[in-house]
Image (tube, rainbow, N blue to C red):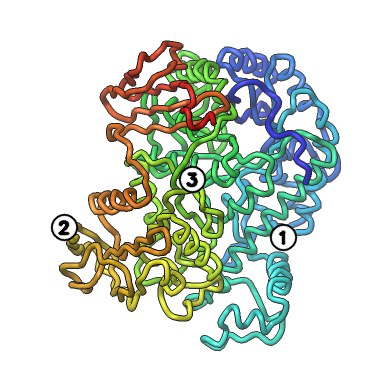
Amino acid sequence: MTRVTPWPALDGIAYGGDYNPEQWDRAVWDEDVRLMREAGVNLVSVGIFSWALLERSEGVFDFAWLDDLLDLLHANGIHVDLGTPTASPPAWFFHAHPEARVLTRDGRTMGFGSRGMASHSSPAYRAAIARIADALAARYAAHPAVVLWHVHNEYGVPVGEDYSPASVAAFRAWLAERYGSLDGLNAAWGTAFWGQHYTAWEHVGAPADAPSVVNPAQRLDFARFTDAQLRACFRIERDAIRAHATQPITTNFMANQSWTTDLWAWGREVDIVSDDHYLWAADPDGHVGLAIAADLSRSVGGGAPWILMEHSTSAVNWQPRNVAKRPGEMARNSLTHLARGADAILFFQWRASRSGAEKFHSAMLPHAGTESRVWREVVDLGAALGRLGEVRGARVQAEAAVLWDFESFWAQDLEWRPSIEVTHQAQVRAAYEQLWRDGVTADFALPGHDLSGYRLVVVPAQYLLTTADAANLTSYVAGGGTLVVSFFSGIVDENDAVHAGGYLAPLAEVLGVRVEEFLPLREGETVSLERADGTRLTARSWTEDLVVAGAETVARYTDGPAAGRAAITRHRHGEGTGWYVSTSLDAAGLAATFAAAYADAGVSASSVPAGCEVVVRRGAAHDFTFVVNHRDDAVTLDLDGVELLTGAATDGVVTVPAGGIAVVRSALPEAATR
């Protein structure tokens, strides 16, 4: 694919959101564009759910209203991210093609009236998405308002896996290509267990509900297949658009909030990475989850600036308890994404809907109108982003990486694992949150990536690890890197089969230990550890019986099923160091362990007050330091430069009020200019 334009053709930071004018009378449109100008909006996403109004029946198009809308937006200086509406096929499509409906794992056919409800393997659906994408691109590729193309919406949400006949047939073809023969399939799936051996391709099905647990290797392959089918649908639309258009093409990911898409693979397909992120209201530290999503979005795009395609001005409507954002929280959320690499800050949606499933979802223009606090904050944010245009294009500097492997996550979270308390979400969050609290900026990476640019690599949940990737991690440490590996890692290969040599075998050389047995704890049970210096630590959920084979024992269990055995180890390998943590440490234990690993890696924890995050974006001529204060009191930091939101020189010190943000432009360090 030729990437014709690297970024939407507009100045400064992009600001705006989803615009759904088809929900409103034509007279409202004029008011909308007037208010968009007042708020500083320069980019809106249009047409994402408009298929039924654009293609009234199969092959019969009506573009008059969209022509009018794009002309109106262009006349008012507002650029357009033009969507293909393929996440919501029209009623006529399902009437004509009932076989295109999704079949769930338990055999239920999904009905009409929602979104994302078509089978991604259906030939009729694939033909229809190619037709509508081609028609839109042929008509609007040269329209001056259109600066970006937006394919589909949130692939894999709400429907990822599909068990329809079309999907089962496609799965068989995918397996035949992957394994080449039934012998290859039987070997990969370990079908000798429970007598599952296949002798004909037509006997192979999708892993639908069964009396007991379904073959985990089959489940893992179906997850891979599902991701591949979704990406194939994206490519159909992308290529139809590219036949006419030169603008960049994207689709909105769900980063750390959707597990049906492997974003490392998707990042190679789009011109620009885009992400939708919504705070989880039940999480009192939701801003940490936000940082994870932002760092992951940046990482899957190779560090390039990315687009925050959706977030909310206040509450959403789809969580059990939809908590409104407090004054100033929207700006903190927005500028945290900007700090972590986003060059576009967009919302769902512009004007709050009066009807439909999302009428209680917040918007830039809320039901309360322009006299509301939310509207005032929207206008203020637009003005702030206008003052931060020079940040665009600057890149985040990270000295650590956290491994994030979707295939491993898919495998780890299947049924019949040693403990339901051991999940990849909890493990990754704990490790990342410690880095966040220590002020260590991190990228995410795969175990097979080139990791040589990082001083520290953290492996919180790498249940599935290939021998090739294990060799890469071993070479990273031999070359001088510091590796911190958490429990239940290096357990199975790419087919979810336990490695020859047992648990942790692929990393035995670099870590100097192996795991003889898992020793999970009962619900609510904790264990104590003691470090060599006498420091006591506490852990929960999980312990292991470690066999030390060359490593230094940093801490031992003092009670529990592994009492007296090694709990945390450190091993010199080549020029670097490999750490292994065999239990789920509490916050204090994790902090102490990471501090020791930082010393090996030459990484310095930040002295910024707790509850504050500091992230640096580096441009061609300046550093831009973002200070986001989540505390209820002001903080003062030593920073020399110009605070861009106020335009004032800092004179070496910047004070950030409670709940506030500062962005300081400073000269590059001398080393960075050489």
Q: Nearer the viewer, mark 1 or mark 3?
A: 3
Q: Position of residue 391 (x, y in %)?
A: 54, 24
Provide the secondary structure element on which disc 2 rests: loop
Name the residue at 33% across, 53% down.
Answer: 597
Distance of mark 1 from mark 2, alpha carbons?
Answer: 60 Å
Q: Position of residue 265 (x, y in %)?
A: 63, 54
Provide the secondary structure element on which disc 3 rests: strand
Residue highlighted by disc 2 = 533
Question: Mark 3: few, some, or many residues within 10 Å (few <14, many ≥20)?
Answer: many
Sequence-wise, which precedes: disc 3 or disc 2?
A: 3
* In the image: residue 124, left or right of residue 276: right
Q: Residue furthest front?
A: 674
Residue 552, visible in the rendered structure: yes
Amino acid type shown at disc 2: Asp
Amino acid type shown at disc 3: Asp
Residue highlighted by disc 3 = 443
Residue highlighted by disc 1 = 121
Provide the secondary structure element on which disc 1 rests: loop
Q: Determine which quarter of the picture holds residue 566.
A: bottom left
Work out whether 526 lies above or below 150: below
Question: Mark 2: few, some, or many residues within 10 Å (few <14, many ≥20)?
Answer: few
Q: Determine which quarter of the picture holds residue 262.
A: bottom right
Residue 35's tag is: none
Q: Quadrant of the C terminus?
A: top right
Decide which of 106, 387 is in the foreground and name it.
387
Name the residue at 69% across, 82% down.
Answer: 182
Sequence-wise, which precedes: disc 1 or disc 2?
A: 1
Q: Position of residue 152 (x, y in %)?
A: 68, 43
